[in-house]
Image: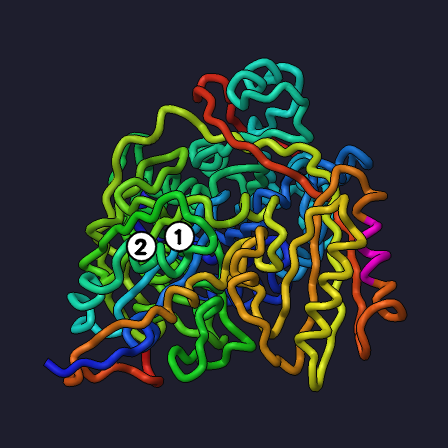
């Protein structure tokens, strides 16, 4: 059983992350030597639904659109240096992604990359329709439905020698747990170790959020070199504990504060962080400095994994229309408020959300209670922003037209109109028995 | 005892996460000596008041004493969540700063951090 620590570097924390992030991570993994893995997390809930829609229009599409740009610059160094790659960039079409990676690898002179595809998460087909309708209590056919798979199929692919493991929907931390499980030979019921590796994966999964991203607050929390923030690398030991560091020659920082914030990010009950692999318990977690930009996490426990798997389904959600116009100088706030009144009168068919950016916006609520509680003031640089949802595109477009018409028909001095119409997807989640989901892996190449 | 009121941000840092229509907001002591005061003053009721206009159906506080951190879980405050909300910030990422602006009464003798290291 291998007991050398496993290095897992994270090169992407969401679809849309920096394309130049993986380079320094891979360079650091290569320089340090030893067993290593590059993890790329690119699949938010909504990202997968959009990928399913793309695949409908084009059977070859449906995987991460920036796959080439993300992977091509680091693929040769990974394949040549024994750094394995694990990613959910397969999205709605992992097999399609795998074939594309095979092409890129061949073009770079690697004839037979061992590429494994994790299967079983996509429950959109007819065979799961009845189960989902019952569990979701909704008889509409969803646009997509995917189960969150765990680490086991990834571990099996790693054990079988995969150099690149492409997945669709898996729980984000499982991208790190799978490699650790296989590398150390852990049992699937070794709850404490799985719990610790899960929290290591949790710290990695959002990329720079543990190394100084989503953190800086000038005057209170400084982040050196933030424009070149480095992405994280976890050193996982045989007991599942980890030290979080970051790519060499980059900016950002790994401190007790960055690690604590990310440890609690999207956590609810800290005694029961649920994944398909384990119920992780961080109530006894401790963090300690372990060198410059290095923080050790210990004290995490694990308990038996949940009996069910989470499924997220997406349905047509109509259309979202947004529009904005700005006012400045004396009376700006009053003119913006008048413009909002005009829109409310002109668009009775829409339930408008109104924001006065520069007065109140992000903290406010769709019903407008916070805005209504604010007495009109004399803010001098105000952007009116309105938004509404409607089942029909034509109705949503009315909002864009009315905001645009404020140029000539609205209050004095309004400028900078921008409008946008976007398709909406609504979501629903349920839990299904593990037996209903057949997770596994297959080879492509 | 003489006291003064400071914004929570001088005592704590934190960030917001979201899942569905639920937000979680961490509040982490910037110095260990603030911890006891934070537990006493930054209560479920105080956070519920800060977010009252968003009509939270429940606010739960979890304490992590080893980390000098608390985690607030706030239900039904995201107007349906990222796919349904009409907010520019449909994730509610800004909400930690609404909580960090809570006024906290501290003893005059307690030095708070008005800037500098976290």
In terms of secondary structure, what is the magenta stretch mainly? helix
Q: In which quadrant is the N terminus of chain A drawn?
A: top left
The chain ID associated with circle 1 is B
The mark that comes first in sequence, 1 or 2, is 1
Above-or-below relation of A308 to B81: above
SS under mark 2: strand
Check disc 2: other Cα within 10 Å, few if <14, some if 14-19, many if 20+. Answer: many
Q: Residue at x 44, y 70 (%)?
A: A215
- Give the residue at mark 1: B24
Q: Is residue A415 visible?
A: no
Taking the image as shown, residue A281 lies to the left or right of residue A371, namely left
Q: In which quadrant is the C terminus of chain A drawn?
A: top right
Do residues under tags 1 and 2 come within 8 Å of each other at their CB atoms?
Answer: yes
The magenta stretch is: A397-403
Taking the image as shown, residue A401 lies to the left or right of residue A130, namely right
Residue A316 coordinates in the image, percent (x, y): 70, 34
The chain ID associated with circle 2 is B
| Residue situated in front as seen by the camera: A378 or A299 | A378
Q: Quadrant of residue B9?
A: bottom left
| Residue situated in front as seen by the camera: A428 or A402 | A402
Outermost residue, right direction? A408
- Give the residue at mark 2: B71
Residue B68 coordinates in the image, percent (x, y): 22, 63
Query: Distance of mark 1 from mark 2, alpha carbons?
Result: 7 Å
Please say whether residue A400 is one of the residues in the magenta stretch: yes
Above-or-below relation of A182 to A254: above
Please say whether residue A94 is one of the residues in the magenta stretch: no
Q: What mark, if any, has residue A74 been given in the picture?
A: none
Residue A90 coordinates in the image, percent (x, y): 63, 41
Q: Is residue A310 visible?
A: yes
Q: Residue at x 57, y 59 (%)?
A: B89
Residue A371 coordinates in the image, percent (x, y): 56, 63
């Amino acid at each position: 059983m291998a007991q050398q620590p496993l290095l897992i570097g994270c090169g992407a924390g969401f679809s849309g992350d920096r394309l130049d992030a993986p380079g320094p991570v891979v360079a650091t993994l290569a320089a340090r030597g030893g067993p290593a893995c590059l993890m790329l997390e690119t699949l938010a809930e909504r990202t997968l639904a959009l990928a399913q829609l793309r695949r409908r229009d084009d059977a070859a599409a449906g995987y991460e659109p920036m796959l080439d740009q993300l992977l091509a610059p680091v693929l040769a160094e990974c394949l040549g240096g024994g750094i394995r790659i694990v990613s959910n960039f397969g999205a709605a079409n992992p097999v399609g992604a795998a074939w594309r990676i095979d092409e890129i690898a061949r073009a770079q002179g690697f004839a037979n990359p061992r590429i494994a595809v994790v299967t079983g998460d996509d429950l959109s087909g007819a065979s799961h329709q009845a189960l989902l309708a019952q569990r979701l209590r909704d008889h509409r056919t969803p646009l997509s439905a995917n189960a969150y798979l765990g680490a086991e199929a990834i571990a099996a692919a790693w054990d079988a020698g995969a150099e690149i493991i492409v997945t669709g929907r898996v729980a984000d931390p499982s991208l790190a747990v799978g490699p650790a499980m296989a590398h150390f030979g852990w049992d699937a019921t070794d709850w404490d170790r799985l719990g610790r590796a899960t929290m290591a994966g949790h710290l990695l999964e959002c990329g720079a959020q543990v190394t100084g991203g989503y953190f800086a607050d000038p005057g209170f929390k400084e982040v050196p070199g933030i424009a070149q923030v480095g992405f994280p690398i976890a050193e996982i030991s045989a007991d599942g504990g980890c030290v979080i560091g970051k790519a060499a020659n980059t900016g950002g920082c790994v401190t007790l504060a960055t690690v604590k914030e990310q440890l609690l990010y999207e956590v609810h009950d800290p005694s029961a962080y649920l994944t398909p692999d384990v119920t992780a318990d961080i109530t006894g977690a401790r963090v300690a400095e372990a060198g410059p930009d290095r923080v050790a996490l210990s004290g995490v426990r694990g308990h038996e994994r949940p009996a069910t798997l989470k499924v997220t389904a997406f349905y047509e959600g109509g259309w979202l229309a947004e529009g904005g116009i700005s006012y400045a100088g004396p009376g700006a706030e009053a003119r913006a408020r008048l413009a909002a009144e005009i829109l409310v009168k002109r668009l009775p068919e829409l339930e408008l959300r109104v924001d006065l950016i520069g007065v109140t916006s992000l903290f406010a609520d769709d019903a407008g209670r916070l805005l209504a509680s604010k007495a009109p003031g004399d803010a001098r640089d105000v952007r009116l922003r309105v938004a509404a949802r409607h089942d029909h595109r034509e109705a949503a477009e009315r909002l864009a037209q009315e905001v645009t018409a404020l140029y000539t028909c609205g209050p004095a001095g309004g400028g900078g109109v921008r409008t946008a119409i976007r398709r909406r997807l609504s979501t629903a989640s349920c839990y299904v028995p593990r037996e209903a989901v057949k997770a596994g892996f297959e080879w492509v190449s | 005892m003489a006291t003064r009121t400071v914004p929570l941000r001088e005592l704590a840092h934190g960030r917001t996460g979201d899942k569905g229509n639920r937000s979680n907001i961490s509040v982490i002591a910037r110095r260990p000596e603030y911890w006891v005061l934070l537990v006493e003053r930054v209560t479920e009721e105080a956070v519920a008041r800060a977010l009252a206009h968003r009509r939270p159906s429940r606010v739960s506080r979890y304490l992590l004493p080893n980390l000098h951190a608390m985690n607030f879980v706030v239900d039904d405050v995201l107007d349906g969540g990222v796919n349904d909300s009409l907010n520019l910030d449909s994730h509610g990422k800004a909400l930690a700063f609404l909580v960090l602006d809570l006024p906290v009464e501290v003893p005059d003798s307690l030095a708070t951090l008005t800037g500098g290291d976290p």
